[in-house]
Image (cartoon, rainbow, N blue to C red):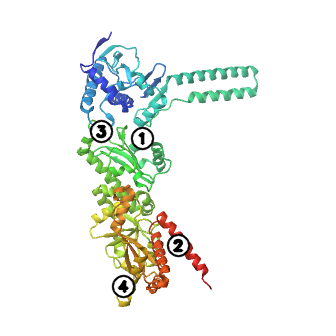
Amino acid sequence: MIQESGNISVNTEDIFPIIKKWLYTDKDIFLRELISNGVDAITKHKRLVSLGEVKVDSQEPYFIKVILNKLEKTIQVIDNGIGMTAEEVKKYINQVAFSGAQEFLEKYKDQDESNQIIGHFGLGFYSVFMVAEKVEIDTLSYQEGAEAVKWVSDGGTSYEITASDHTARGSVMTLHIEEDSKEFLDKYELRKILEKYCAFLPIEIYLEDVEEEKKAREEAEAKAKEKEKKAKEKAEAKTEDDAEDEDLADEDIDEEEDSSPKPINDTHPLWLKRPSECTDEEYKAFYQKVFMDFQEPLFWIHLNVDYPFNLKGILYFPKLRRDFDNMEGQIKLYNNQVFVANNIREVIPEFLLLLRGVIDCPDLPLNVSRSSLQNDGKVRKISEHITKKVADKLNSLYKTEKENYEKFWEDINPFIKFGCMRDDKFYDRMKEILIYKSTSGEFTLLKDYLNRNSDQHRDQVFYISDEKQQTQYIRLFKNNDLEALYLDSIIDSHFISFLEMKETGIKFSSVDSDISQALKEEPDTSEEGKSVQDALESMFQEALDRKELKFQVEALKSSDVPAVILLSEQSRRMQEMTKRFGDMSMGGYPVEETLVLNRKNDLIARLGELKGRADRKEDVDMICRHVYDLAMLNHKPLEPGEMEEFVRRSNHLLTRLAEVDD
């Protein structure tokens, strides 16, 4: 008879308190570790069977069960894997597993977050002592003639090994949950943990609640007795109709008997299949199941790599919101179908974290720190390969499904632009398919835009950053057959600067920052023209009394526009940056605004003729201020006080008009 007791290690007293306290925020990993051990045990047994080294007498399928007993305050994890002998228990539990946990804790317990192991892989079996005050292992090896073994430890310095009455191959881990961890004595909490870490493990996992199972059995027995009683009463009646009812009752009983427990995991996740074996419906269903998003993704990329590393997964392009700063995707990282963590920046390129997807990489080292991952050559190659596959997919979409590419552009362009700015290699692969919506109503490449407009503005790109606020400027461009590009997403102010750095020699100008030569006629250089220009500038300067405001008189081809406000490109970019990042320290940055007066407009021309008319001085000042406010309203909203004055002045002018005799 097996009987042994002893100390796990001389350092046990130091280790267990650390295990209980250090990872208090990640206690749930204990269940992941136990399930993973069960999967390993089953996988080893399946391997021995396949090699013919083990004969299986029964056809019982492999399984892992998690059994909750609230009354006993226990959680059991049961597998029918390879099992262990007494010697193997001493070797793997007392020595290997403990040494691994000890090394893990000694190396990382005092490290900051950047040096922690992702997902705390490495703590292994001894993570159970984060939640358990006592742990029992009942195990029976697959080996012929092996005796069942029980290992017991209360999380202190000692352990005990005795004979066990366990009769089935495999292991039963029984955790006696301590008071501080009683939240785990809840079926829904356990299900949540299993669905988080084990949703796609290759062995079926079942979750049972002893109390629920007992109640269900009692209810089933009660129903069976009730139906049996009714059937007996009907049989005694011996009527044809009653016999038919009896058959129906039997059918109901059969239906209930056919119901069986369902595993909580999908043992054959979609990413393990070949892309050619998957349908669009399967991809969409998988997306909805994993990310709980019932809005269909735009498209997806199925990763399937066997060399030079093993990498599988699916990346989805969801519909992205325009508020780029608040966009957050979710890339779930797996290792051999075990969930590791979400959005691991050390493995997944940062810009890809705007997407949603799953990536399973068995070659990913899990026993190194986050900082070590950043410098790992294999991890860098994995990251680069993922980036390349994304770029390849987008290029293929542009070349073979250009209409869909353009349809998706509004949703995917923030992601693509962010990727270009963060990864030079990604930009090099994407620059020939970066498209822009034009005022022509079509999408265009930058090089095609520059070629079409080289005669009117060589190496200059006019763009629209706010369609509503720049309506007047857009109309000016369209009326004069000029083309501008829409760059109005929140990332575009940064992307424009990026393009100017990459595409040297090209200048980007907002439609409200510069009057293109194509929008105006040749300047009037005559003495009379110079006199009118000086008069208008003087009149407006005196009426507005804005020292910081510049004035410019031009002959715009559109005579219906009296004036427009131009904001220097540098000032406009600084304003946008201030607004989007909420940087109040930029509030004192000088704003360079220019009021462009259109001398071809009838009102402006008439004002020029009133220069020096003292009897019309009040009217001239009022009209100048009104022209300025109208131009400003096409540029940005007026301040509350300015709007109040504008409304008052408008009412006054309308009243004056109404008083004019026919």
Farthest top residue in view: 1
State which mark lies toward you, 1 or 3.
3
- Find numbered disc 4 in the image and state the secondary structure of the residue it sits on: loop
Mark found first going from the N terminus, 1 or 2: 1
Distance from the alpha carbon under mark 3 to that under mark 4: 65 Å
- Three-letter amino acid code at disc 2? Arg
In the image, 525: left or right of 609?
Answer: left
Distance from the alpha carbon under mark 1 to that under mark 3: 31 Å
Q: Badge 1: few (under 14), some or many (20 or more) residues near its Cα, within 10 Å?
A: some
Q: At x 39% / y 50%, what residue is drawn?
A: 355
Question: In the rendered image of this protein, does residue 489 appear above or below residue 93?
Answer: below
The residue that disc 3 covers is 113
Q: Which mark is residue 523?
A: 4
Question: In the rendered image of this protein, does residue 117 appear above or below residue 233?
Answer: below
- Find numbered disc 2 in the image and state the secondary structure of the residue it sits on: helix
The residue that disc 2 covers is 649
Residue 639 seen = yes
Q: How many marks?
A: 4
The residue that disc 1 covers is 269
